[in-house]
Image (cartoon, rainbow, N blue to C red):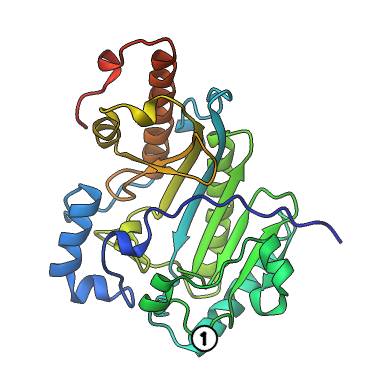
Amino acid sequence: MWKVKPPVYFPMETSPASVGCVAGDAESYILFCDFFDRVIEAHHGHKITSQTPESDFNCDNLKGGEDLDRSYAVRCEVSVVRGVEGFCFPTHCSRGERRELLTLARRALQRLEEDLPGRLLLLEDLNQDQQRELDFDPPSDSQLRIGVARDWPDARGVWVGKDGSLVVWVNMEDHLRLVSTRDDANITEAFKCMCINLQKLEDLYRELKHPFTWKQQLGWVSSSPADVGTGLRIRVQLKLQHLPKHNRLQDVLKRLRLCMDTTDSPALYCVSNTATFGLSEVGLTQLVVDGVKLLIAMEKRLEVNGDIEGLIPAQK
């Protein structure tokens, strides 16, 4: 037996509540496109066109993600959500669908274990102490309201890689959520781990006749419009003392297309991308890398009572 390294959790600032709605299934984005298109364009700041969204998983195209200043960058997380074709999203799926999704996940993850050892843990098999060790929380009020906690904890689980490099959540707020966390804040390595294993799982699900859910004009889709396109989130925890108090911070974040949230630790903030649609996977990750480096540069300037006006970027 080997000890599970519990994943590091970051605030979920892009929960379904942040856009005020969720989809029951993939077809909802087509049948109710007049509604969902407006929500997506407003949230992501990108116009939906007939053009297929750009995709780029080539880690070699990412620059500078391995050398963030560790005096400020504490850790990072790269995560991605995916829906599975042929099933309603967790907001609307039945108990039978959820159990079938768990069976598919078990089969695919067993194949993944040939390259990356790990094990699947079912929430219903864990006692309260084990759930706390894995940071399982009871369903929130918002999860109860939107239906993702229906029949809790039936057919919910988490697959944990033996080396701690990858965690896969099954049947939580999405069919699948892959998470790669690094305590050295090396975004490049976290992104690489995510890309390699996501593409392996994509191939495995395709072999099982249930590919991930893709829509021509939107890219990858899942229950929340906040996650369409790439479904990708890059989060970096930063130690900041001065910048959070600056009166231009919100303007800076808006220009960088980033958001910043507090954490349980004083002077520790979580920075992440606000949009998942409109840029490729590498493009979004590069956006966060460049933005985090600029925020660190501003913090350093403020530490010596300097002015950051010259560092503020033009509106993107």
Q: Is residue 105 visible?
A: yes
Q: Name the residue located 39 percent from the left edge and 27 percent from the top edge.
A: 290
* Callout 1: SS: loop
Question: Does 192 appear above or below 184?
Answer: below
Q: Residue at x 35, y 29 (%)?
A: 245
96 over 58 or under it: above or below = below
Q: Is residue 112 visible?
A: no
Percent position of residue 279, x then y:
31, 43
Residue 55: x and y in percent read: 37, 47
Q: Quadrant of residue 251?
A: top left
Front one among 28 and 68: 68
Screen quadrant of the N terminus = bottom right
Left/right placement of residue 99 relative to residue 88 reads right
Picture quarter with the C terminus: top left
Q: Quarter-wise, where is residue 213 in the image?
A: bottom left
For the point 38% across and 23% down, the residue is 294
What is the three-letter code of the residue carrying label 1? Asp
